[in-house]
Image: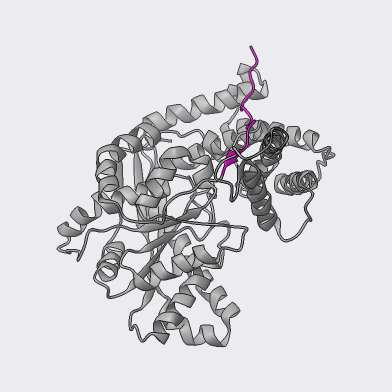
Amino acid sequence: MYKPFKTPVTQASPDIKVGEPRVSRFVFFLLRLLTRGYLFLYFGITKVVLKGDILVHAFKRALAGESRCIIAFRHPNGGEPQILTTYFLFKLKRYAAKMGVRFYRRPHAVFAYGYEVLRWGGWVARFIMPNVGAMPIYHSKLDSKGIARLRKTIIEGPYPLAIAPEGQITYSADTVSRLEPGIFRIGFQAVQQMADKNINCPVEILPVSIHFRFGIIGKRSKERLLRKIESYCGFPKKTRKLPLDERLKLCRNYILEENEKRYNINNDGSLSFNERLDRIVNAALETAERMLGIKNEGDSFTRMHKVRQICWDRIYLPGIDNLDHLSYIQRNAADLGAGEAWYIGRHQELVDFCLFFRNEPPTESSSLHCKVEYIQNLWNFASRTMGGAVEDRNNIFIRKVIIQPGPIINLSDYLSEYNKDKKTTISTVMSKLEKAFLDCIDEADKTEKDRYK
């Protein structure tokens, strides 16, 4: 019997309020009790491995007040902040001790995250994140308070600030899609303020790339997931006898065509998959903007973040603590707006994924982690087409997590260049960070192979 893939939002809710970020020992105690089970039950993680000593020494300097550290971490899957927080809190100290390194204080890092996480993350996110020092920031609103808070965290320390320079989940561990300049602007502003205050302390960017490796459970799970996608597409069982890349392309093209039908786009066989996907992205954004009554301004990412912000603001009404003061008509009008925003948000969620779904399908000879990632993403493509979002991602159990740091980038060394030409200097540092990420990817592939194909 058919049932809808998602249940839409039908009621508007008051604004979400959380306290100022702080570090709570009680919450740390709870995390110590619960995180091991959470990482295993939700992600299937049995082992986390840190490579090299770069991260250890960066933490040592930062925690002793000898430097300020910005951890620029890659964010391909969604679980990276949880994994890193757990490792920093409960494993890094022991790892450092084996190297003969002792920290001045308990290692920890405070994370920056998009404010929308508090809205879709539920009460757990609203309780834990402020109490581990995590700081919300808006993508598409002027957020002077949030930026000032990040800058203050860098200047005062003592904990490193962790932020994803790609801006959001990118769905690809082995490619660097795009880097946003915001982290560098905030970093250089902090460097300048520290220089003005005669604080002789370098501000360092520590690149961190995170990679997943899978075992026999992952091998079996990815086949089950692919069969589920094929069944959702209506393909017969004989399709399973085809080579892997052909099976993946059949599913991918079927889902693509369904989206083209949805937006009344003619199927142009002369175009590549990515070109056809670009047409869908633009049509989805134009549809959402038309429904919201807003102008088409900026690139696809800017437009997507704007649509997302407006939709969330119609579901969780900003500046309103409760809805008791609304009249009967006002309340029902607000609920109607929330329901409409939910449906408009389905176009935005499709765009959010399609902007990054650009890799070619793996073949039988590809590594297992590449196959797993692609099939997970293919499921994402299907779920977004059916009205899903990031929380509908299918998590295949992970055997091992690799934390691969890259070489330190000292922002303080570029201050004089930054004062002469801000745009060029930021571009230079961004290129260094991108190269560091690519080197991390290569290093992880060399040192940690999959056991299975």
Q: Let me know if residue 206 appears in the view.
A: yes
Looking at the image, residue 61 sits to the left or right of residue 297; the answer is left
* Foreground of the two, 215 or 124: 124
Give percent across and percent down for residue 421: 58, 84
Looking at the image, residue 34 sits to the left or right of residue 312; the answer is left
Q: Residue furthest top?
A: 1
Give the vertical position of 407 relative to 389 (above or below).
Answer: below
Question: Residue 155 lies in magenta, yes or no?
Answer: no
Question: Residue 4 lies in magenta, yes or no?
Answer: yes
- Magenta region, mostly helix, strand or loop? loop
Q: How is the image coloured?
A: one colour
Give percent across and percent down for residue 127: 39, 44
Give the vertical position of 375 relative to 301 (above or below).
Answer: above
Give percent across and percent down for residue 136: 48, 55
Give the vertical position of 293 relative to 231 (above or below).
Answer: below
Q: Let me know if residue 445 appears in the view.
A: no
| Residue positioned 69% across, 40% down in the render | 341
| Residue positioned 76% across, 46% down in the render | 292
Give percent across and percent down for residue 168: 54, 52
Stretch of the chain drawn in magenta:
1-14
Looking at the image, residue 250 sits to the left or right of residue 197; the answer is right
Give the vertical position of 162 relative to 449 (above or below).
Answer: below
**Quarter of the rendering occupied by the N terminus:** top right
| Residue positioned 36% across, 34% down in the render | 44
Looking at the image, residue 64 sits to the left or right of residue 114; the answer is left
**Quarter of the rendering occupied by the C terminus:** top left
Label count reads 0
Residue 368, picture quadrant: top left
* Foreground of the two, 239 or 278: 278
